[in-house]
Amino acid sequence: MRLSEFDYKLPEGLIAQYPAKARDGSRLMVVHRISKKIEHRNFCDIVDYIGPSDCLVVNDTKVIKARLPAKRADTGAKAEITLIEKMSDRLYKCLIDTSTKIKIGTKFIFVDGELTGVIRGESEGIRLIEFSINGTDFGDILEKIGIVPLPPYIKRSPEKGDEERYQTVYAKTPGAVAAPTAGLHFSDGVLKKIKAKGSSVESLTLHVGYGTFKPVSADEVARHKLEPEVFELKEEAAQRLNYIKGKGGKIFAVGTTTCRVLENQARLVKGSKNRVEKGKGWTNLFIHPPYNFKFVDALVTNFHLPKTTLLMLVAAFCSREVMFKAYGEAVKEKYRFYSYGDSMLII
């Protein structure tokens, strides 16, 4: 398929710059894949669609404060360094925003010397920086001086409220540089109601990387390569998911990241329900049409940018025809788009 087949026009005014006042106060579009029916609901109504034998699967990754204000050690020139991928405890792939020329060996200072970093390598605009810490924990430094890494299409500076709202209520495993945004809508209250019905809630981890914002450059979609991301599906969670699937329960994946981990770990079982296997490592599974889903039955997701891999996954799940019908309806009804926007449930 061609990249142009995943393009659409969106009025800029529909791009959400702030979250809804209440975490679960967004609108919810419910898309029925088979009948092609579309419903307009409120997000808290999602409870109505998850049955007592079903399971909601969430991504418990926690967004780190990945943007770090810095200055050059030699000139004092200001810079901002964004962590995009952890290579080891002290080595990160980074983006550097500065008005001065930089090269391998350039040193940066953070927090009056409490943290320093030296460029050790460079490739396609991405720098490899080795950090040195003076008597404290790297995570504590990030929490102290770091800034929430809002997506580039949010045209404002991060504010105090973003530290809470650009994070899911169940986030617990630090490592993401972007939020798994489908999960931002779930409040403690909504999760409590889902569990009260007898429905299960399970978690896995995928640390969302900067590649989620990387544009697709290949005109032929199948030639595009996703950046690998770290994931983990624990044995206990896999066993419970397989039990639910085996009993006929439906698997609701919250977000494209959760969906990709489940499909990455899915195994076909002849004459029986498919299963998922525990696993820990890296995945760059790229889901696009045509794709036969092996484990996921329903998808909770936001409204995505044109020509992105996220949009392609949605098209694979419900077909391009149904997806663009839903997106056309969303524009007409003035839904809010992207990370801080409204939600879609595809069943």
Image: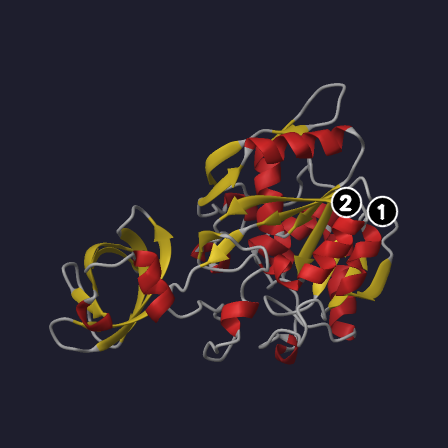
Position in image of residue 334 (x %, y %): 74, 76
Q: Which residue is mark 2?
A: 199
Mark 1 neighbour density, 10 Å: few (under 14) some (14–19) many (20 or more): few
Which amino acid is tagged 2? Answer: Ser
Position of 157 with respect to 136 (left or right) is: right
Question: Is residue 309 among what the camera can see?
Answer: yes
Whether residue 312 sits left or right of residue 207 in the image: it is right
Query: Which residue is at the front of the view, 67 or 160?
Result: 160
Q: Is residue 258 above or below residue 212?
A: above
The residue nearer to you, when weighing 177 against 289, is: 177
Residue 5, x across and y down, in percent: 64, 56
User: Residue 182: percent from the left, percent from the top?
Assistant: 63, 58
Image vertical order of residue 317 relative to residue 78, above or below: above
Q: Quadrant of residue 248?
A: top right
Q: CA distance from mark 1 to mark 2?
A: 24 Å
Q: Is residue 1 visible?
A: no
Is 150 placed left or right of 253 in the picture? left
Callout 1 touching callout 2 (CB < 8 Å): no
Q: Nearer the viewer, residue 72 or 175?
A: 175
Q: Amino acid at mark 1?
A: Ile
- Where disc 1 sits, the SS reads loop
Single out the mark in the foreground, 1 or 2. Answer: 2
User: Dot 2: what SS?
Assistant: loop
Query: Sequence-wise, which precedes: disc 1 or disc 2?
Result: 1
**Based on the displayed image, in which of its 4 quarters is residue 276 positioned?**
top right
Q: Name which quarter of the figure residue 330 lies in.
A: bottom right
| Mark drawn on residue 128 | none
Above or below residue 234? Residue 190 is below
* Nearest to the observer: residue 347 or residue 204: 204
- Residue marked by disc 1: 34
